Amino acid sequence: MSQAIFNNIRIVLCQTSHPGNIGSAARAIKTMGLQHLYLVKPDKFPDAHATALATGAADLLESAIVTETLSEALTGCAFAVGLSARKRYLSHETVNAREAALQASKIAASQPVAFVFGTEMSGLSNAELDCCQLLAMIPANPEYSSLNLAAAVQVVCYELRMAILEGKLDAPGGMELATNDELERFYAHLEQTLIDIGYLNPKAPKKLSERLRRIYARARLEKEEVNLLRGVLTLTQEPRKHTKY
Amino acid sequence: MSQAIFNNIRIVLCQTSHPGNIGSAARAIKTMGLQHLYLVKPDKFPDAHATALATGAADLLESAIVTETLSEALTGCAFAVGLSARKRYLSHETVNAREAALQASKIAASQPVAFVFGTEMSGLSNAELDCCQLLAMIPANPEYSSLNLAAAVQVVCYELRMAILEGKLDAPGGMELATNDELERFYAHLEQTLIDIGYLNPKAPKKLSERLRRIYARARLEKEEVNLLRGVLTLTQEPRKHTKY
């Protein structure tokens, strides 16, 4: 299901000057599970430098579609988002990259969408912006907002992946957590040990015990970890049993 | 106000091989309004290639702090997040980059925090991971998860910026967290105590120590809690000093 959404998203790079940026962008795109790269009038392509920087994403360069115009690259798209480094167009609706990714991923559930990136030096032209339905900005440092092209592609593809997968990590490898009664037995063992070593006054153990419980509660102990900690407690008690009691 | 939070965040790159990646990372960091770059044993630094790729962020390279060890770079930090490309540590708490940025930005409202990146080839070593309280992953394509180092830095710094500028940052839970060096002294004390009671074999302490560190890393110990635990350790050691040694 989510694979179909990824498959409906195009990344379009317009008139890119440096082939290295095309390669780095391909790598960024593939790491986020996207695959469709469109190049509108690239300065140099194909190019060895692009392939070198793409590393394991060279397949995206091989299947990239090169066009003469942006509108060719957008053929069949239901929604195109233009990336802009600054708020240029009062008349264009402008949102941040996260919001744009959310909107686009919803549409991509059923129809192709595109994210359009301009040149390294000057971004998208007015004519190119007019092919887009929405402008998106990456909220950057106002004093230095110059993201590298591939870095901007990385952030946008990352937001698309987060929107599609809702940020899920793979199921956690899952050690079993200790049960409540195992924890209680551990706490009792801990308390007894602290009494044995003279740290706790058995007549007023309350406050300190609680503070220690809080530490271990926050750690969300696994079964094995409880065993390990109880092993420490047992050895802590032992010499006293032999030498003092 | 938010400037103070940005100012409390360090980006730490461990044993980076390619100086170009250091430059690109500096650019990524500055575009997101961060400024503190730490380099642990970089292969080549300073380097003309780093400066070239940093473009307008060369000032971050000039003020970068170079250290011999990760723990030096983390001096004074209350919270360190290690970036991992894959789920290596079942027992390390692992969250996605967004969640890590949210947690870290809350702590950075009052104390220094760090995001730690490993080498291009193999990421963070086990010893480096053990200096971190939390692992973060960028949810990537499982079939090709190899983000370029600077691209990973870009995504993390972007999430930090989003968290800081959007976040309703609640006042942190109140108590001051222990710093990295306080934690290291606690771990050393713990290890010595375990050797004293015969739980650890000083010739092969590694595995058990690591498992215990992870428990306390997950708990995010406060300063006072470290004092409390060290009080327990001191008393655990004492009778042996008197009776056995």
Image: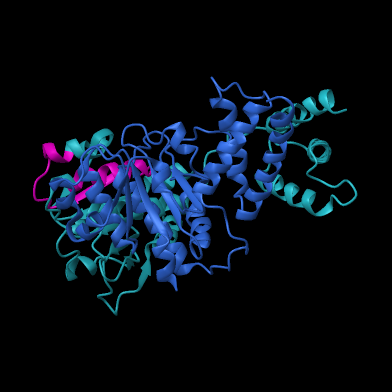
Chain colours: A cyan, B blue
- Examine the image and state in which quarter residue A196 appears: top right
Q: Is residue A53 left or right of residue B152?
A: left
- Examine the image and state in which quarter residue B16 appears: top left
In the picture as drawn, the residue positioned furthest to the left comes out as A43
Looking at the image, can residue B128 be seen? yes
The quadrant the C terminus of chain B occupies is top right
At x 72%, y 31%, the residue is B242
Task: Give B196 or A75, whichever is nearer the viewer.
Answer: B196
- Residue A136 in the image: state x and y as whole percent: 33, 66
- Residue B78 in the image: state x and y as whole percent: 51, 54
At x 46%, y 62%, the residue is B163
In the picture as drawn, the residue positioned furthest to the right comes out as A203
- On whether residue B50 falls in the magenta region, the answer is no
Q: Is residue A198 left or right of residue B168?
A: right
The quadrant the N terminus of chain B occupies is bottom left
- Residue A91 in the image: state x and y as whole percent: 29, 79
Magenta segment boundaries in residue numbering:
A21-50
Task: Give A192 or A188, whichever is nearer the viewer.
Answer: A192
Task: Give B167 or B178, whichever is nearer the viewer.
Answer: B178
- Residue A4 in the image: state x and y as whole percent: 43, 44
- On whether residue A24 falls in the magenta region, the answer is yes
At x 39%, y 47%, the residue is B73
At x 20%, y 60%, the residue is A118
Looking at the image, can residue B94 be seen? no
Relative to A95, is A236 above or below? above
Q: Is residue A221 left or right of residue A39?
A: right
